[in-house]
Amino acid sequence: MAIRKSDIYKSILNVIGVAGILAVAAIAPNTLQILAKLPGTRRYFSSHIHSRIQRLRDSGLIEFLEINGNQVIRLTAKGKIELQRYQLLEKIKKPLRWDGSWRLIIFDIREYKRNLRHKIREELKRFGFRQLQQSVWVYPYECQDIITLLKADFHVGKEMLYITAKFIENDKWLKRDFRL
C-alpha cells in the first residue's frame, strides 16, 4: 500500500497541530522515523517529508520561527483551517442506513467573485458532494459541520444556504452515484 501525498501532508499538519510548536530538530529523529515505518514507504521517504514541509511552508500553512534560539515550526491560521478540514473529513462517517433526506447546498456568489465560486465548488467536490445544477450541490448525509466550516472559511454567510429535502425528482442517478 503506497502512501499518498495528501496523507503525508495530513500527518505533518497533525504532528505540528498536536504539538502546537514543533522544534525543527525534533522532526528528523522522531517524526521522520515514525512516518518512515508506515507501510508503502521507501528509502527516500525522509526527502519526501522535507519537500512536503517546504511545500507546506510555501503555501502558507506552516511557518518557521526562532524562539529562544531554537528554530521551530508552527501552524499558521491558514494551516489550522486546513488541519480542521482534514480532521472534519476523517470525522464524517456515513451512517449504516441513509435516512432518506437529501442535503442541498445552494450558493449565489456574484460574478466578480468567480474565483471564490470556483474554490467553493472544489471544496464541495473534495467533501464528496455531487453537482445537481450550476450552484446547487447535493449530499445524502448530515453535513452541517462542513457547511459551517465553508461559510466561515470563505466568508459567505447568507450567500450559501443549507437545505434538507425529502424528495428530488429523477434522483436515481444520485442514488446510484452515492450507492444508496
Image (tube, grey):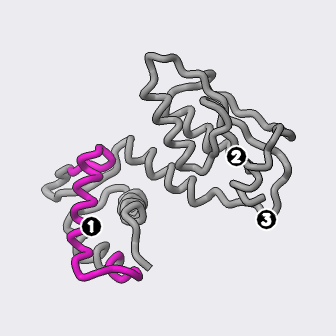
Residue found at x 61% / y 27%: 107
Quarter of the image where one finds residue 163: top right
For marks 2 and 1, the one nearer the N-term is: 1
Q: For the residues carrying marks 2 and 3, which lies nearer the camera in this image?
A: 2
In primary-sequence order, the first of circles 2 and 3 is: 3
The percent position of residue 110, horizontal first and vertical second, equals 52, 17
Q: Residue at x 22, y 61 (%)?
A: 51
Mark 1 vs mark 3: give the one in front.
3
CA neighbours of label 1 inside 10 A, class few (<14), some (14 to 19), many (20+): many
Provide the residue designation for mark 3. Answer: 96
Q: Are marks 2 and 3 in contact (CB under 8 Å)?
A: no
Q: Which residues are magenta?
A: 35-64
Query: Which residue carries the number 1 mark?
Result: 49
Kind of residue at badge 2: Tyr
Residue denoted by label 2 = 139
Q: Quadrant of residue 26?
A: bottom left
Horizontal side of residue 177 vs 166, given as left or right: left
Does residue 96 sit above or below 78 in this rendering?
below
Residue 162 appears at what percent x and percent y? 70, 33
What amino acid is labelled 1 in the image? Ile
Mark 2 or 1: in front is 2
Q: CA distance from mark 1 to mark 3?
A: 36 Å
